[in-house]
Amino acid sequence: MQDLHSFFNVSEFEDRYGNSFQQLTWGDSLLQKLDGNSIASSDIVIIGCGEMRGAEGNDLYSNAPDEVMKQLFQMFNWHPAVKLAYAGNIAQGLTTDDTRAALRTVLSELQESGKTVLIIGGSHDLTMQQYEAFKKKEQIIDVTVADMLIDLEETEEMTDRSFLMDMLTKEPNYIRNYSHIGFQSYYTQPRMLETLDKLRFDFFRLGKVRENMEEIEPVLRGSHLFSFDINAIKHSDAPSNINGSPNGFSGDEACLLARFAGMSNNLTSFGIYGYNPTTDQYDITAKQIAQMIWYFVDGFLVRKNEALLKERVEFMEYHVNATSLETTFLKSKRTNRWWMQLPNNSFVPCSYNDYLIASKNELPERWLREQERLM
């Protein structure tokens, strides 16, 4: 892996706080500068990128990552088996494209080294740099975005309201499936949903997701990239987002989504965007994001303990032989999670509810959507 020092600002946390954190807190263990040893031995690498020039009307380089890390440093580390490294913040480039290029290089290098990367942004358009790291490797991936909006506007330059247009339509394209969770219908152009449906992508309205959060776990389990815009959380639980909505995910639901992401064996890139510390009274939103990171690590521990699908002795098999569907379901003995077999004999993540539907001689919608994508 190439030397990444030049892409980062020197962290001031060590000089500022020294050894002031309690033992067994993240601050006690994460105050280390970017170096080969800390990165090489880590499972998860946290990097900050405060680039906000992709957001309309905001040309400031945010100190959002520092504010989030201050809150994370005060939290206790319950999972020492998961090794974290804190790399610091991507240095601001002369132009937005300069910062994006630096972030893209760092993400590519870290993922090439087999690391799971957690990005604290920054405006939501930085999601594109997450994708570019996979694109560079020509890796076909599944992408999930949590956002109250669907950022498919057409603009001359890529912004936080238009980056999905580039991500989903530019060729060559390496996205097998795109899932959008938590959109709010009153802020969503109906034709956008028609476009996503024609592309056989999945979208989940906020109210539908909140009815049964567990149904989203298989979506994130199959994803390689997860991008979370803080506006997906209702304003009362993330008050720094002055353009937010009175409705949205609660703080604990956002933490649950982060935990689901951490549990995914596929997922190696997780970004949290849209946080503005200048409007964050009492640091509530910074604490919310730090808690999401804590839960991501909590989920990662489940990932480390899960068996591989080829280790069939670790799974219970359920065979469904119905009129409309003949397939096999697997249930993990370690985590109680489910998978279902497709006609091409591959297994995809599913829920217990999918098994119940199939056992009633009905086709689960998740099975149908996956079947469509095989055609």
Image: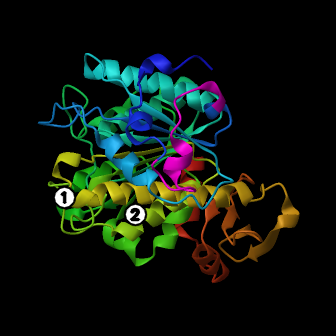
Task: Tell me the quarter of the picture where residue 161 sits.
Answer: top left
Q: Is residue 23 magenta?
A: yes
Helix, strand or loop under label 2? helix
In the image, farthest residue toward the left: 57
Residue 40 locus on image (x, y percent): 67, 32
Residue 92 locus on image (x, y percent): 30, 23
**Callout 2: 10 Å neighbours few (<14), some, many (20+)?**
many
Q: Can the viewer see residue 174 in this picture?
A: yes
What kind of colouring is applied to the model shown?
A: rainbow
Q: Where 226 sits versus 246, above or below?
A: above
Task: Tell me the quarter of the picture where residue 95 sits.
Answer: top left
| Type of amino acid at the residue the image marks with label 1 | Gln
Q: Which residue position is annotated with label 1?
A: 281
The answer to whether 184 appears left or right of 354 in the picture is left
Residue 28 locus on image (x, y percent): 53, 48
Q: Which residue position is annotated with label 2?
A: 254
Q: Where 319 sits versus 64, above or below?
A: below
Q: Can the viewer see residue 263 in this picture?
A: no
Count the marks: how many? Answer: 2
In the image, farthest residue toward the front: 19
The answer to whether 55 appears left or right of 311 in the picture is left
Query: What's the magenta region?
Result: 20-37
Question: Residue at 34% across / 32% down in the picture?
Answer: 166
Question: Residue at 30% across / 19% down in the picture?
Answer: 93
Q: Earlier in the sequence, mark 2 or mark 1?
A: 2
Between circles 2 and 1, the one closer to the viewer is: 1
Question: Residue at 25% across / 36% down in the picture?
Answer: 62
Task: Tell me the quarter of the picture where residue 305 sits.
Answer: bottom right
Q: Is residue 252 magenta?
A: no
